[in-house]
């Protein structure tokens, strides 16, 4: 369960403020894979980072009764001067999982080769995303936050990413951001639509997609 309690978030744009989350009160169900839909700039990535706790709300709060991943595909939280392996070891200690097991999983999964032992500052955005995806999939969370991650890498890597993500979804829920409707239909059970600072839950995924497409028109 993830519950938003009168949640508000805005940013200053010039002389005014843009509200991306407007007094949101909503409870999302447990163990469900949700598509987070909305136009570009609606605030989807901001909402994911707020759920993860990496961005603070202006007011209100988010309550959860389970463990939540950081936004998969977002590598901005890595320390640039540490290597990939050192970052993974730090993550393992933070989340209380076996360090060497997580390092071995990510090293094998992310396919970074010698770059795994090089500083993050030398990574491309795709390499950071692969590291972030591998680290999150190596830890069991109740809810995974996913931001376009299966678009990273070549066809073989994308297939592998989908396979491990499907395996995690057998026991966990997710909130998935993707512009590919085929991917959303493959992974998600229901949808939430973010539009003008408001978030609407749709237990019927097709209804959520239809509402999103109508808003885009």
Image (cartoon, grey):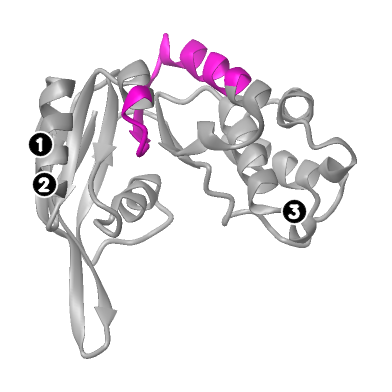
Q: In this figure, which residue is indicated by the disc labeled 3?
A: 123
Indicate yes or no whether the magenta region holds residue 163: yes
Label 3: few (<14), some (14–19) or many (≥20) C-alpha neighbours in 10 Å: some
Q: Which residue is drawn at 27% across and 81% down?
A: 13
Residue 213 locus on image (x, y percent): 16, 39
Q: In this figure, which residue is indicated by the disc labeled 1?
A: 211
204 w.r.t. 112: above or below = above
Question: Residue 66 versus residue 43: which sits nearer the camera?
Answer: 43
**Residue 104 disc label:** none
Q: Nearer the viewer, mark 3 or mark 2?
A: 2
Question: Residue 114 versus residue 9: which sits nearer the camera?
Answer: 114
Q: Do the residues labelled 2 and 1 touch (CB within 8 Å)?
A: yes
SS class, disc 3: loop
Q: Would residue 146 be found to the left or right of residue 209 on screen?
A: right
Label 2: few (<14), some (14–19) or many (≥20) C-alpha neighbours in 10 Å: few
Q: Nearer the viewer, mark 1 or mark 3?
A: 1
Q: Would residue 59 be found to the left or right of residue 160 on screen?
A: left
């Amino acid at each position: 369960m993830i519950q938003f309690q009168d949640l508000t978030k805005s940013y200053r744009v010039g002389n005014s403020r843009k509200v991306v989350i407007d007094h949101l009160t909503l409870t999302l169900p447990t163990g469900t894979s949700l598509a987070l839909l909305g136009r570009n700039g609606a605030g989807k990535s901001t909402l994911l980072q707020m759920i993860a706790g990496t961005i603070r709300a202006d007011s209100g709060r988010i309550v959860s009764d389970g463990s939540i991943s950081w936004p998969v595909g977002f590598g901005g939280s890595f320390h640039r001067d540490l290597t990939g392996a050192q970052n993974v070891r730090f993550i393992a200690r933070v989340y209380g999982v076996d360090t060497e097991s997580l390092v071995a999983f990510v090293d094998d999964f992310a396919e970074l080769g010698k770059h795994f032992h090089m500083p993050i500052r030398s990574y491309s955005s795709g390499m950071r995303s692969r590291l972030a995806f591998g680290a999150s999939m190596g830890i069991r969370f109740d809810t995974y936050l996913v931001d376009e991650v299966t678009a990273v890498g070549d066809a073989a890597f994308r297939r592998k990413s989908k396979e491990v993500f499907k395996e995690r979804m057998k026991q966990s829920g997710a909130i998935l951001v993707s512009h590919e409707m085929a991917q959303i239909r493959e992974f998600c059970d229901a949808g939430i639509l973010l539009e003008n600072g408001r978030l609407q839950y749709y237990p019927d995924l097709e209804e959520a997609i239809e509402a999103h497409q109508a808003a885009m028109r």
